[in-house]
Amino acid sequence: MGCTASRTASPIASSRQDRLEPRLRGQRLFGCQKGGDKTGPNPTDRGRLGTKRHLITDANGLPLAFILTGANTHDSMPFEELIDRIPPISGKPGRARRRPDKLHADKAYDHRRCRLACRRRRITPRIARRGVEISQKLGRHRWVIERTFAWINRFRRLVTRYERKSDIHHAFTALACSLICFNRLQEEF
């Protein structure tokens, strides 16, 4: 009787184990992975985990490059990496330009290292100074980047980050930026 019971019970036990397994093969669920990488406590949202988009656009608001970081990262920290991600600008005959002529930025980028990073790359920095310049004067150039952020937020998947892996969120953001460029170019032609 014991021999017969063990033979019939073993297939049921293995099938229940597969059925009750809460994850797929190769997936690990731990408490530390809940927010994913490139997240940090958001200082404006009661410390909830969040992701910040750092974006650089042309004068018309078309996204040229972006970087994703944790929400607690200061805007000026990935400044040099963001400038280095600008693709070559073509159009005129000859060698493609690698850098823009000038760069407008708000008061968050008013640091000596940001100005030096621009000058090393032969870019004229137009960065508002803290405590010197008023914010109304900066609004002539700031609305362009704010409009681009609004265009990105029209893609509802990007308003709240649901993905645990940063490469998936990065891919969705890249897709949104490419669709924005495609729509703007389609209107011109």
Image (cartoon, rainbow, N blue to C red):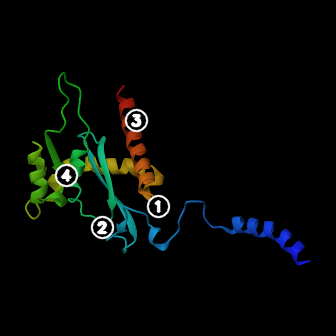
Q: Which residue does the image show at 80% across and 66% down from the upper left? A: 11
* First along the sequence among labels 2 and 3: 2
Q: Which residue is mark 2?
A: 72
Q: Is residue 73 above or below residue 53?
A: below
Amino acid tagged 3 = Asn
Q: Which residue is mark 1?
A: 164
Let me know if residue 128 appears in the view: no
Per the model, the C-alpha gap separating discs 1 and 4 is 26 Å
Q: Which residue is mark 4?
A: 80
Looking at the rendered image, the disc whose residue lies closer to the viewer, 2 or 3, is 2
Q: Is residue 103 above or below residue 35?
A: above
Per the model, the C-alpha gap separating discs 3 and 4 is 29 Å
| 154 relative position to 93: left or right | right
Looking at the rendered image, the disc whose residue lies closer to the viewer, 2 or 1, is 1
* First along the sequence among labels 3 and 1: 1
SS label for mark 1: loop
Q: Is residue 182 above or below residue 140?
A: above
Q: Which residue is mark 3?
A: 183
> Where does the C terminus fall, quadrant-wise?
top left
* First along the sequence among labels 2 and 1: 2
SS label for mark 4: helix
* Residue 186, image quadrant: top left
Q: Which residue does the image show at 23% across and 51% down from the upper left? A: 81
Amino acid tagged 4 = Glu
> Where does the N terminus fall, quadrant-wise?
bottom right
Q: Residues within 10 Å of mark 1 (few under 14, many from 20)?
A: some
* Residue 61, image quadrant: top left
Q: Which residue does the image show at 8% across and 47% down from the upper left? A: 119
* First along the sequence among labels 3 and 4: 4
